[in-house]
Image (tube, rainbow, N blue to C red):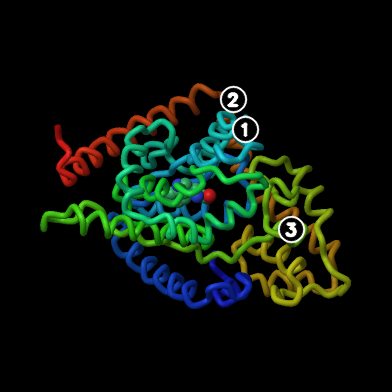
Amino acid sequence: MNAVSTTEVAGASGGRDLLGMSAARRRSAELEAMIREEPGRFRVLTGDRPTGRLHLGHYFGTLHNRVRLQDLGAEMFVIIADYQVLTDRDVADQVSDHVESLVLDHLAIGMDPDRTTIFAHSAVPALNQLLLPFLSLVTVAELGRNPTVKDEIAHSRQASVSGLMFTYPAHQAADILFCKANLVPVGQDQLPHLEVTRTIARRFNDRYGTGGPAVFPEPDALLSAAPLLLGTDGGKMSKSRGNAIALAATADETAALIRGAKTDAERRITYDPATRPEVSNLVLLAALCQGRDPHRVAEEVGAGGAAVLKRTVTEAVNEYLAPIRARRAELARDRSHIRRVLRAGNERANVVAEATLAEVRVAMNGLY
Ligand code: TRP
């Protein structure tokens, strides 16, 4: 599946923080080797904000990887970060629908609730009890200069910034550390949050450790080896931009989106992300769905131009998603099943979180 080299991914990041990125990529490659050797060593936590139906950008960016890790035998937790959308007015009104939709998407792609704990942040009170001691371990300056927080503030389109916004990195540390996850598959935009998590784990262990085994591991970020998929207009794939192909979209909706996709004036189709981002993105999409090298896909379309390219992409996407969509539709018929899956996940997450909180109380000498 990973037919594209990571140098192209670095190129797509626009040169931002290339050194930090390449270190993170190197580490991810090492981790991949360790996972192949001994998957049972890994406890994985990752998750999403409930902002709507998941799309192909999510799928090839992280979801596909979650299924792979689960099937390799790593222990998995998926958090639905419903406390991380409170600052987003557009979303907050529909959170409960979005939460169900996230569960559906995960089940449809092959996450198995018997092996993977899917739970909602707000259903696990101990997470918020971890938040307070964690907040004491980071400074206001550290939170304020966190690039992910800055980005979110810039995009929040609100007149003022709530205090909650600044707690997100510490919040996320609690999401990750409550289950002592040692591996966190994330997109590169989340690396600053993960750095805060590592800092909090280290400082907690330093301050409250008693010489025994550390309370918290310092978790590693696992970056996906898949290249970044853009939206059909060549911008970041995002539901709010109308350029995203949802996993749950119909075959016709998918065809219409791809038909309207941006291309360029050059007839012959090539794969060259740096100079032809829109065309290359369509080629990449077909290649990812077919598990092929994008250069080969581009060659095959060649002189056929944009029309043949779009037909190829539409067929590839619809064929790839057909079983996922069928499964999703089937599951959507039984809402009570979705509720049960979530309730069971919440229960399991609570048991784990309570156990960690008990350890934290002992470490902090707060058992009374
Ligand atoms: N902040 C993440 C996002 O915006 C969602 C998230 C919340 C998360 N808690 C997490 C991701 C813990 C990984 C681990 O996508």
Q: Label 2 amino acid?
A: Arg
- Viewer-proximal residue, 241 or 295? 241
Q: Label 3 amino acid?
A: Val
**Circle 2 Cα neighbour tier, 10 Å, few/some/many (<14 / 14–19 / ≥20):** few
Secondary structure type for disc 3: helix
Q: Label 1 amino acid?
A: Ala
Which quarter of the image is occupied by the C terminus?
Answer: top left
Tell me if residue 67 can be seen.
no
Secondary structure type for disc 1: helix
Tell me if residue 147 can be seen.
yes
Badge 3 or badge 1: first in the primary sequence: 3
Secondary structure type for disc 2: loop
- Viewer-proximal residue, 330 or 41? 41
The residue under label 3 is 313
- Viewer-proximal residue, 133 or 73? 133
Q: Are marks 3 and 1 in contact (CB under 8 Å)?
A: no
Residue shown at 50% from the left, 28% from the top: 338
The residue under label 1 is 329
Up-down relation of residue 305 to residue 58 (above or below): below
Residue shown at 60% from the left, 76% from the top: 15
Task: Return the residue found at the far top.
Answer: 336
In the rendered image, residue 120, in percent from the top left (x then y), is placed at: 44, 35
| C-alpha gap between disc 1 and disc 2 | 7 Å
Q: Which numbered circle lies on residue 142?
A: none
| C-alpha gap between disc 3 and disc 2 | 29 Å
Q: Are marks 1 and 2 in contact (CB under 8 Å)?
A: yes
In the rendered image, residue 191, in percent from the top left (x then y), is placed at: 47, 62
- Viewer-proximal residue, 56 or 37? 56
Q: Which numbered circle lies on residue 333?
A: 2
